[in-house]
Amino acid sequence: MIKIGELSKVTGCSVQTIRHYEKEQLIASAERSEGNFRLYDEVAVEQLLFIKHCRSLDLSLPEIRQLLGLSRSPGAQCDDVNRMMDRHIEQVEARIQELTKLNEQLRMLRRSCSNRRTVEQCGILRNLSATPVSSG
């Protein structure tokens, strides 16, 4: 059994994050020592590393909660897991398209000004101050 500070070091998650996941019931509530310190076992370490990996893939807490629930039924078909991952991939692809458009807009904005201009002549500032044209 380890205290929350050690769990934080082992997993690379902040103490605040660990407490948040515990509050959200993503990890089991910790036992308490006689001195009222939270104590965690190896299962908590594994759960926290699983959650951290999921978060690195930008999965939401509800998605992680669902995955944790599904993982408790090892004999079940993984259709639900696959559907969730397919939805997440679609969301990521949509965000990539949005970010690609943003990148194009920023590059176009950057091309509107050379390094040899003064702030008063800055094409970027002029374009940002211009009234946007409605796209609808």
Image (tube, rainbow, N blue to C red):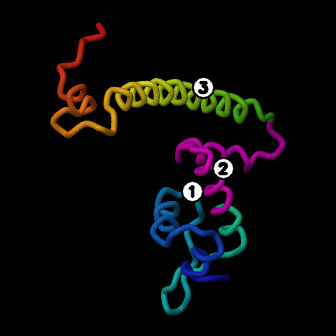
Give the amino acid at mark 2. Answer: Leu
Q: Which residue matches tag 2?
A: 68
Q: Which residue was labeled with disc 1?
A: 26
**Residue in front for this viewpoint, 30 or 109:** 109
Q: Report the residue that reaches farthest toward the front.
A: 116
Name which residue lies at 66% across and 49% down.
68
Q: Is residue 79 left or right of residue 2?
A: right
Disc tally is: 3
Q: Which residue matches tag 3?
A: 90
The CA distance from mark 1 to mark 3 is 25 Å
- Sort mark 2 into few (<14), some (14-19) or many (20+) by Cα contacts within 10 Å: some
Q: Nearer the viewer, mark 1 or mark 3?
A: 3
Region of the chain picked out in magenta, as a range: 48-76
Q: Is residue 86 above or below residue 18?
A: above
**The disc labelled 1 sits on which kind of residue?**
Leu
Residue 64 position in % (x across, y down): 60, 47
* First in sequence: mark 2 vs mark 1: 1
Circle 2/circle 1 CB separation < 8 Å: yes
Which amino acid type corresponds to the residue marked 3 in the rendered image?
A: Glu
Mark 3: give few (<14), some (14-19) or many (20+) Cα within 10 Å. few
Q: Which secondary structure lies at badge 2?
A: helix
N-terminal-most mark, 1 or 3: 1
| Closer-to-camera residue (76/134) | 134
From the viewer's side, name the closer residue of 65 and 54: 54
Q: Toward which corner of the image does residue 44 lie, by quadrant?
A: bottom right
Say which element carries label 3: helix
Asked if labels 2 and 3 touch by Cβ distance under 8 angstroms, the answer is no
Q: Quadrant of the N terminus?
A: bottom right
Query: Of tags 3 and 2, which is closer to the observer?
Result: 3
x and y percentages locating residue 32 in the rendered image: 54, 82
User: Which residue is pictured at 67% across the width and 28% down the height?
Assistant: 86
